[in-house]
């Protein structure tokens, strides 16, 4: 349930994280055995990150699902994993029962040479090497 890779977006939560993060034995085991996705929650927001470990394509997906206003679907076919995120739409604050796709993540392992990862929207992979905040002071 706890995120391992930091940073993640947080909304009205305790902000707990997994002890030792990417340096933990748990994370090392997932890398060793070629795990594709680690799902987490806790922080009531959506963030997707890729491990910093060389030679691994392990993805962490932190998602929210408060009051059924946001959920993931996962389709696995042969060597392709397709994750979609859906947001509730409608005139009421919640319980509209209508949803639209708000992003996707595709892990394509059909090549024997490399894994291709593509993403968009709320499932866009966070670039951990890019600035997390950008201020623009022009008028």
Image (spheres, rainbow, N blue to C red):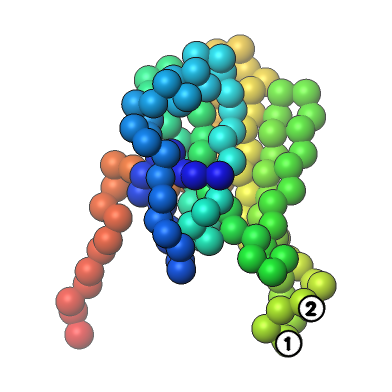
Q: Residue at x 67, y 83 (%)?
A: 93
The crowding category of the residue bearing disc 1, from other C-alpha atoms within 10 Å (few below 14, some 14 to 19, many at least 20), is few
Residue 98 lies, in percent from the top left, at: 80, 72
Residue at the (17%, 76%) spot, across then down: 137
Most foreground residue, 2 or 109: 2
State the residue position of label 2: 96
Q: Give how far across and how far down residue 89 sits, in percent.
A: 72, 75
Q: Residue at x 72, y 66 (%)?
A: 68
Specify the quadrant that holds the N terminus: top right
Q: Classify residue 9 by image quadrant.
A: bottom left
User: For the residue labelled by badge 1, is the local secondary structure a helix, a strand or a loop?
Assistant: loop
Quadrant assignment for the C terminus: bottom left
> Contact (CB < 8 A) between labels 1 and 2?
yes
> Tag 2's secondary structure?
loop
Can you identify the residue that label 1 sits on? 91
Residue 37, percent from left and from top: 59, 33
Instruction: Please tell me whether residue 35 is drawn above or below residue 81 in the rendered image.
Output: above
Relative to 103, say whether 68 is above or below. Answer: below
Q: Is residue 19 visible?
A: yes
Sequence-wise first label, 1 or 2: 1
Q: Which mark is residue 127?
A: none
> Does residue 52 appear in the picture of this structure?
no
Q: Based on the displayed image, in which of its 4 quarters is residue 50 positioned?
A: top left
In the displayed structure, does residue 129 sit left or right of residue 112? Answer: left
Report how far apart the C-alphas of labels 1 and 2 lie in the structure.
7 Å
Does residue 55 appear left or right of residue 135 in this picture? right
On the rendered structure, is 31 left or right of 78? Answer: left
Occupied quadrant, residue 54: top left
């Amino acid at each position: 349930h706890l995120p391992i890779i930091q940073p993640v977006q947080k909304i009205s939560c305790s902000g707990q994280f997994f002890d030792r993060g990417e340096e933990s034995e748990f994370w090392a085991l997932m890398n060793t055995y070629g795990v594709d996705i680690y799902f987490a929650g806790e922080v009531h927001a959506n963030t997707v990150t890729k491990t910093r470990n060389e030679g691994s394509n392990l993805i962490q997906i932190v998602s929210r699902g408060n009051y059924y206003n946001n959920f993931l679907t996962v389709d696995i076919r042969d060597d392709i994993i397709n994750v979609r995120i859906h947001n509730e739409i409608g005139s009421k604050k919640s319980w509209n029962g209508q949803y639209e796709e708000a992003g996707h993540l595709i892990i394509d392992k059909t090549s024997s040479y490399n894994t291709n990862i593509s993403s968009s929207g709320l499932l866009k992979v966070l670039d951990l090497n890019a600035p997390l905040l950008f201020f623009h002071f022009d008028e």
